[in-house]
Image (cartoon, grey):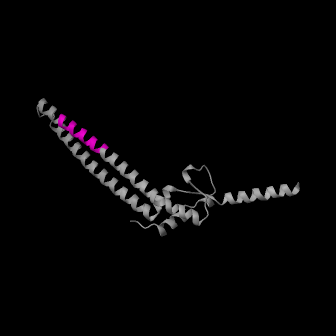
């Protein structure tokens, strides 16, 4: 009986040890923001977003300028002319809002496409990293309630990616 208990304890402890060394986690945001390949994508997205914001701010200033001009002359011009200018301003505001919505939608679509391509490209490298380091499972850090930081392989994976991923 003692031999059976000893064998079971040995089997359980070796299984626990094996499982302990096979599950790790990484921070996907950190992979994107700190790897060389990810930084290129993030910078490209920031540049596009900055350009969009700049264009929209320029249009907003123009609309504000038109509104200010209407306010300055509203007591001087006829009601008919005032209504025409206000109507024109409203039309320009509608056009601006459509342009703004389109820019944001296009940016979101482009961003999602770029992020999907990023993760599709890094997946084989993550699999290779897992194979080299005998890792069975890598979890995303956001989905873990609490864990010991010694199981965080983010920095090692970033180093591995920087050495192995060549941007096309």
Indicate the position of residue 109 as horizontal and vertical percent values. 36, 49
Q: Residue at x 60, y 65 (%)?
A: 133
Q: Which residues are magenta?
A: 87-101
Image height of 95 relative to 150, above or below: above
Q: Is residue 167 above or below residue 108?
A: below
Q: Nearer the viewer, residue 66 or 89?
A: 89
The quarter of the picture where residue 23 lies is bottom right
In which quadrant of the rendered image does the N terminus lie? Answer: bottom right
In the rendered view, tell whether residue 22 sits above or below residue 86: below
Residue closest to the far bottom: 163
Question: Which residue occupies 76% across, 58% down?
Answer: 11
Magenta span: chief secondary structure: helix
Q: Quadrant of the C terminus?
A: bottom left
Query: Is 95 colored magenta in this rendering?
Result: yes
Is residue 65 located in the magenta-colored stretch of the structure?
Answer: no
Q: Residue at x 46, y 63 (%)?
A: 35
Q: Nearer the viewer, residue 2 or 109?
A: 2
């Amino acid at each position: 009986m003692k031999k059976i208990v000893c064998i079971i304890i040995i089997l359980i402890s070796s299984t626990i040890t094996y499982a302990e060394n096979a599950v790790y986690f990484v921070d996907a945001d950190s992979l994107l923001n700190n790897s060389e390949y990810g930084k290129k994508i993030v910078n490209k997205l920031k540049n596009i977003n900055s350009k969009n914001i700049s264009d929209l701010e320029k249009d907003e200033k123009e609309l504000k300028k038109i509104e200010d001009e209407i306010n300055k002359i509203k007591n001087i011009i006829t009601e008919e002319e005032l209504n025409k200018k206000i109507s024109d301003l409203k039309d320009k505001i509608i056009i601006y809002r459509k342009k703004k919505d389109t820019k944001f939608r296009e940016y979101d679509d482009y961003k999602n496409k770029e992020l999907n391509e990023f993760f599709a490209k890094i997946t084989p490298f993550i699999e290779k990293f897992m194979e080299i380091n005998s890792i069975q499972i890598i979890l995303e850090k956001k989905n873990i309630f609490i864990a010991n930081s010694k199981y965080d392989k983010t920095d090692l994976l970033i180093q591995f990616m920087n050495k192995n991923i060549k941007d096309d």
